[in-house]
Structures are given as structure tokens and as C-alpha cells.
Amino acid sequence: MRTELVSQLLAMALFWLCLCNNLFLVSGLCLHDQRSLLLQLKNNLTFTIETSSKLKSWNPNNDCCGWIGVKCDKEGHVIALDLSGESITGGFGNSSSLFSLQHLHRLNFAYNDFNSVIPSAFKRLENLTYLNLSCAGFLGQIPIEISQMTRLVTLDLSSLLCSSGQELNLGNPNLRKLVQNLTSIRQLCLDGVSISAAGHEWSSALMSLHDLQEVRMSLCNLSGPLDPSLARRDNLSIIVLDWNDLSSAVPETFANFKMLTILSLSACQLTGTFPQKIFNIGTLSVVDLSFNINLQGLFPEFPPGSLHTLRVANTSFSGAVPHSIGNMRNLTELNFCSCRFNGTLPNSLSNLTELSYLDLSFNNFTGRIPSFNMAKKLTLLDLSYNGLSGSIPSSHFEGLNNLVTIDLSNNSISGSIPSSLFTLPHLRSIIFSHNHFAQLDEFTNVSFSKLDILHLSSNNLSGSFPTSVYQLSRLSVLELSSNKLNGTVHLNKLSELRNLTTLDLSYNNLSVDVNVANADPSCFPSIFDLRLASCNLKTFPAFLRNHSTISSLDLSDNHIQGIVPNWIWKLPNLAKLNISHNLLTHLEGPFQNFSSELEELDLHHNKLQGPIPFFPEKGFYLDFSDNRFNSVIPRDIGNYLSITYFFSLSNNTLSGTIPDSLCNSSNLGFLDLSNNNISGTIPSCLMKMSKTLELLNLRKNSLMGPVPDKFSAVCALRTLNLRQNKLDGKIPKSLSDCTSLEVLDLGKNKIMDVFPCLLRKISTLRVLVLRENNLHGHIGCANTTATWRVLQIVDLAFNNFRGKLPETFFTSWEAMMSEENQDESEEKKIRHKIYQYGHLYYEDSVTVTIKGQRMDLIKILTFFTSIDFSSNHFEGEIPNELFDFKALHTLNLSNNAFSGKIPQSIRNLKELESLDLSNNLLEGNIPTEIATLSFLSVLDLSFNHLVGKIPTGTQLQSFPASSFQGNDGLYGPPLTEELDGTEPGVLQEHQTTVSTIDWNFISVEVGLIFGHGMVFGPLLFWKQWRTCLLVYDYKAHFDSIDSRTSLDSRFSTWVVPPTSWDVQNLVQTRVIVYSLLVNDYKAHFHSRGTRTSAVVPYVLTGGFFS
């Protein structure tokens, strides 16, 4: 018994001895010198105790090996130190005690803010295998001493996405010198380090690292090309080179990486076609090729694989998405946004049960939307901006309890909006705008809905306002504009949605009752964007009177009349106000000491009158057009427009001159003063503003004098419209500096100049209107091969241009040759975006002759093309190049002296709607090919020398007889059936006119002889007046009626010098002259499109001699 007791006591003693010994070893694990070095390090570092989680816990009384961030080996040496995220701001240099921790293997200083260079003393840490200085605030040159840390396996010096704004760089040493001794390196992370090396340099440096597995060098200023030899580093598993300008194709050899898991080449300016075989690497988990707009590619048939992230957004990948994509069962993210994919969406997408993020927006997908009810982890579904159609069964989205955002906007989806969407517990955003949805069913059980955004604008929703919306208590954005909803909406009820920040009910058939029971700021307490355009309002919403949160207010297109109340100007945060298209007459003052946050003010199309009352000092967009303001423009106006970008006073009755102070508006980009009564000259300083001005519209005023030749050498003008003023002088030479000019309209002025070849290098020119000026000479520009490739409207009518049309001049007008799809979408108009405001555009207008009528094109579609060379002195044959304009819509060459035949190539003008070749000298038959122009609705070939039968059995018979009259040898319907030897006229109903013409012809001869005899007879025997009176009287009459051919040379052959005349010769000459007068008057009126019979009464009454 005693023996057992002794044995137990000995055993217990031995146990406690061992236990105490173990405790001693643990408590004494941290060596004294290691503790001292760490405490010295802590005392020297600058950090904030409140934000520290590691350093502040270093208690000198505790074992240092137990301190947070410290790890020791069995002997008590510190082998790992992690001080990441400690917000250290200084106290670290070459003398730091850190560099005495010779046993250190791992060091992590990431996410601090040292704001100093990397100490060269790092070379003393010879045993270091892991060094992480990423986002630590280090800057400047990476020291060469880092290259002496030959045992490094991981080196992370990344500074990408760090907030410090500082950067590390590799200049000297460069990348090759840095890594030349780091033969053990496996992970090399240099994201954000400025390396600035060409493709062969950085590639060869990496090739020397035989164990390299991971390379991350995003945003390092690397250049290309990608070196195919990189594929020989077959250990590489991670390649991340985002945001470098590689400007090269991806080598086919990259498909040889057998261990590759991550390939990220986002925003590298990649070109060519991406190798399909890379997608078949079985180990791949991430492929990111996004933001390489010139990178093309097609997806292969996908085998089962480990891929979980596939991003090709903003590339030129195209084709259909293969059905085999359903084999990639591990996919969690698909991002194909802004590519060129087409075809239908494969039903196999429903197999991707791990999918959480799917963005297929901005492509050309068509057909129906497949079901996604198996993708239970889906959080985002974006199929916007495609061509998807059909209806959506409610079952498609059932059970998607993790879905947060669904965006199907800008498609052609029809039917009902699935009510099951509103019951999804985490759904916060439904964006279905710009579709064809016709019905929104009432929904229930939504009291716990988290729905924040409901955007259903621009659909075909009909019926009354959906009352279920009132149950969406968390709703902040409600947009239902541009639908067919009807009935009355009471804002009093909607005001119960206390979180509502944006409300848009515009452009329905709704009548909105703006009267609310509680008209104080507690009504709609969070609203800052209220849009009630075209809501049958008759008054301003009174509940806004004292509202402090409203920032944007749109009450346009309503029936509000009378005075704009002054409280609206006092809303403290109102930045955008649109009250255009109402019946407003006055703005209530006072405006003294007016101060406002207004940046966008739209008052256009009201009945506002009197002087312009005020200009908001922060106004960026100001539109006062289409009103009845009738004052002069204030002389100091420019002092109020210092930040104004868009300013329009067009279509008022403003008078006076353009103030010079307007040139103080240094930010002005759009200035429209058109359609007023402004007089005086154009200030020279206004042309100097073309450095910032994109549009200057002064049309339809009374401006005079020359256009100042002061355009900026860096002219930014895209539209210059000076039409219908009284401007004279020449076209300014400095206008040639406006190399972005798209629309130039100088029509209906008094400009006297030659054809503006000075503009020939403006390749952006789309509209050129010079009609009704005093321009002269030949057109065309010598030694020019590329002129105006996008020109689509050119109008030179009613000038004095002459000569033949140069054939080569038209060969570069490619826009008129292109058979572009005539899609009248918003993108197909010549318009200017008001940049800061994405929803605002200025659309150019131009006046053209269409189908014989002058029309104002308020919106110039980019596919509309027109040529008008009428009423000039052009001659010779019509160039064949004009008949290559397959996209031409209107062609007017009338009232010239064109000769030759109408060519058969006229059949090329497939889009032609209006053709006017009247009053020329064209001859030959009407080509049958003209009947193939199926869009031709206006045709005028009158008063030429065309002969033969009008082609029958074609649409030519649908044109009136006036389209063909005045052609002596032309017959057939709708003219006379047969050529009978008399002048062809119209059919039976016009035969009396034909006979009248013959009698009138005689009357012309008798009248002319009698008239000339009475006037000139006595004077012929007055020797000193004989010749000069005959010559100058005859010539003067032709000049007075704007004869299109010069008579000087012809008349000199008719009259002999008076010294050789005798009485007999005088009588003979007089008869010859009279006869020539009759013939020439007849020919003249034929050439001007006037029938001889219509002139006879004027001749007989002596009209030519009055």
C-alpha cells in the first residue's frame, strides 16, 4: 500500500516537473534580442493607436512570439512579421531594427502609407522568401538591392488601385536587372509599377525565371507585342497584364499553357482574332479579355471545364453563342456586354446553375428569352439593348430568390410584365424601359418587397395607373413615362411613398392631380427629380413652394398659362427647370439680387413677352427660343453667361445688334440667335470664339457687311448657319481652319466670290448651301483627289456659276454613292449632343427644294441626299459620275444650258424621288431606264430638245403633261399620241392652245416690227444714233430679263459698221435684226420655261420697250 502511494507521488511529481519545464520553454520562446528589436521597431514607427490592431497589442510583458502579426520558430527567432493594414505613416528607413531580424522568412507591410522610398537595407534579409510591400505607400525607383534577395519566392510590389497616388518605377535598374538573380521566384506582382518596356524586353526578362508560376503586371506602361516564346514557361498558371498598350494579337502558342488558370488581358489594345484553342485549356478558371475593342473572336464548342469567369465585354467578339456553353457548369460570371454577338440565346444557359452574374447587354441577340429559373444564385441579369422579342412566361424567373437587378430595357419584348418578379425577396431593380410591354398586372404580397427602382418608361402599357405600386413602400425611383396609361393619378396617394426620389409620369394619357392635402415639405420628403410633362396640368404644383430637396423639375407640354410664380426661382436646390411648351406669358419678379442654383432652364415655346428678364448666373443650358421677347439683347449679356454652354434666343422678335460682350462667354459651345430682327454687323470677336463654339446660328436676321475673317486656327465649329441675311464680301479664308465643320449654310445673302475651294480639306462637311448669292466662275477644285466624302446636301442654285461640271469633282462624294440602310433612328440625324446633359441634343436644320417645294428640314437625316445646281450658267453634258450616286434623293439641274443626251446610267439612281432637268438643251430620246426609278414621284423634263415617243406602259404616264412640254419632237401620252408635224402639245383638251400659239407667232412678228418701226425708224436716219441705239437697246432688254447667254459676240455678227451702210443696206439690216429679235425672244422664253403664247400680249403692248 505504502509502495503504491510512493509510486503515485513520484509520478505526480514527475508530471508537474515536466509540465513546469514545458511552461518555461513556452514562456521563454521569444529570445530577448528578438523582443528588443521588435519593440524598437514599434517605437520608431509612426502609426495611430486608434486604428491599429497589431502594434498596439505588443505588450513588453508578454511573450513576443504571441504578439499579433509575429511568428517564431522553435528556437524563438522571429521568422514572419505581418504589419499589413496598420496605417503606418513613417519611421522606417535603412537604420530600422527590422533589418537585424536575420531569421525573417516572411514580411508583409502591405496597405500602409510609408510615403518614402524602399530602403536598400532589405538586402540584409538574406533568408526572406516572401516580401509583400503592395500598396504600402512606397515611391520612386525600386532599389537594385532587391535583386540580391536571391531566396525570394514571392515578390509583391504592386501599387495598383492604391489611394496614395504615388508610384514605384523601374528605370535603372530595369526589370531585367531586378529579376536576373531572383531564380527562385514563383510569384511576381508588379501591378501599377511604371516599367515602360517593349515587348521583347519584358518578355525576355520573364523568360529567365524558370520557376515562374504567376506574373501580375497590370498598368505598368508595357508595350507590345506579346511574345509567343512566353508559352515556353509552361509552369505559368496566372498571367495578368491588364491596362497595358500591347497593341498586338494574342499568339496561338498561348494555347500551349497546360497549367494556365487565369488569363487576364483587359484593356490591352489587343488586335486580330483571339485563338479559339485557348478556351479549351482544361485548367482555365478565369478569362478576361474585356475592353479590347479591336479584338475579334468566335466561341468554339465548349467542352466540360473548370471555367468560372468569362469576360469579353467591349470587344468585337461576334457570332452566335454556342449551345455547348451549357457544358461549363462551374460558370459564375458571364460578361459579354457591348460585343457583336447575334442569333438567339441558347436554352442551355438554364444549365448554368452556379451562375451569379450574367450581362449580355448591347449586342444583337434576337428571339425569345430562355428560362433562368434553375440559376438560383443569379444576382444580376442584364439583357438590355438587344433585339429580343416575344413574351416572358412568369415561370422564367420563379425561385430566383437572390436576384437583385434585372435589366431588359431597349428590346422588343411584348406581353405582360411577370407579376412574380415583384415577390422576389431581394430584388431591388426592375428596368424594362423601351420595349413593347402592353400590360402590368396588379401584384400582391409585396409588403416585404425591397424593390427600389421600377423603370417601365417607353412601352405600350395601357389601362389605368397600377394601384399595386402604392404597396412598394421602399420604392425610390418610379418611371412610367411614354406609355398609354389613362385616368387620373392623385399625387396625394403617391406621396405616401416616403422614399420616392424620382417620379416620372410624363407622356401618357394621364391627368395628374397635383393638389395634395399636406402641401408642405413633408409631402414627398425625399423627391429631387419630378417629371410631369404632358400630364394635363393647368397650374404649378403648390406643394413644391417650400420644398428644399427638389433638384430637377419638368412641367413641359402642359396647359399651364399666365404667370410663372416667383417662388419657383427661390427653390434652394433647383438645378433643372423645363416649363417649355406651355401658355406662359410673364415671369413674376422681382429679379433683383436674383440668386439661383439653376443650371438648365428651358422656357422655349411659350408666349413670354417683353424684355428678357434675367440670366441665371450658374446657367449652363439656357433656351429662351420660340417666345415673344421683343427687346434688344442686353449690352452686358456676356457678363452673365460666364459658364453657359448652350444659349438660344431664336424665333423671337429681338432687335438691335449683337453685343460685343457676348464674346466674354468663354465657355459658350452653342449660340442660336436665328429668326429675329437683329441688324448691324457680326462682331469679329464672335468668330474668334470658334475655338470653343461648336454651333453658331444667325440665320434669318438683317445682318450686313462681310463675314469677319477671324476664325480661330483651332476652330471647333461643326455648324455655321448665316442664311438669309444681307451679308456681302467674300467667304472668309480662315473658315478653312474649321476642320470639323459639318453644316455650312450661307444661302440667300449677297456674298460675291468664287467657288470655295478653300474648304476642300474639310472632310467632315455634310451640308453645303450657297444658293442665291453672287458667286461666279467655275466649280471644282484643281489638284484635289479627296474632297467631302460625307457630303450629302449641296445647294448652289441661283448663282452665276458657269462652264462644265468637272467630272473628277464628284468621284469622292461617297455618301451619295452609299446605299445605306435608311434607319430613321435618333443616331441617324445630324445633331450635336449637349455633352454634360446626355438627354439633350441640338438638331441642325436646313432649307432644301424637295419635289418642287422649298422645305425646312428640321431634322437632317444622315441618309438624305440632295443636289441642286439649278439657275446657273452650267453647260455641256451632264457628267456620268453624277449617275453613280445610288443614294441620291433629289437632283435639280434646271435652268442651265446642259446639252447632250440623258444617259441610260440614270437607272443607277435607285433612291431618286425628285428629278428636274427642265429648261436646258438636252436632246435625244427619253431613256426607258428612267421608268425603273420606283421612288420617283416628281419629274420635270420640260423645255429641252427631247424627241421621240415617251416610253409607254411605265410610270412615266402618271406624270402630268407639264413634265414633258416644250420639247418639239416629243410625243406620246401624256402628250399627243402621234407626231403630226405641228408642235406637240397636250392631248385633246389642250388643242385650242396649240392653234393659238401659231396665231400669236404672227402677232409677235407684226408687233415687233411695228414697235421697232415706231421707235427706231426715225432714229435710223440720224447717223450718229443708228448703230448704237439698235445695239444697246437690244442688248439692254436681254440684260433686264436676266438672259442666261451672253449676246455680245452674237450681236457683233449681225450689224455692220455704219460707214459701210447705204439706204438699201440699212433697210435690209433693219429687217434682219427684227427677224432675229423675234426668233431670239422666242428661244429665250423657251429656255426660261415660259410659253410663247404667254408673252404675246406683253409684246403687243410694247412691254419690251417700256
Image (cartoon, helix red, strand yellow):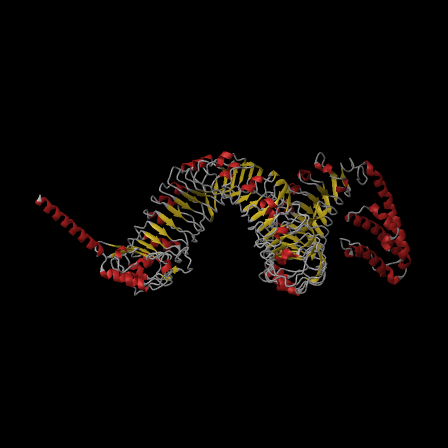
User: Is residue 1087 shown left or right of residue 28?
Assistant: right
User: Is residue 1055 shown left or right of residue 607?
Assistant: right
| Most foreground residue, 705 or 542 | 542
| Most foreground residue, 682 or 422 | 422
Q: Relative to 503, does residue 758 appear above or below in the rendering? A: below
Outermost residue toward the front in this view: 1
Residue 900: horizontal and vertical position, in percent? 70, 46
Image quarter of the C terminus: bottom right
Residue 470 seen in this snapshot: yes
Dividing the picture into quarters, in which one does residue 978 lie?
Answer: top right
Residue 354: horizontal and vertical position, in percent? 41, 39
Dividing the picture into quarters, in which one does residue 666 lie?
Answer: bottom right
Residue 849: horizontal and vertical position, in percent? 70, 48
Residue 832: horizontal and vertical position, in percent? 60, 52
User: Is residue 913 shown left or right of residue 451?
Assistant: right
| Most foreground residue, 99 or 144 | 99
Residue 1056 seen in this snapshot: no
Image quarter of the N terminus: top left
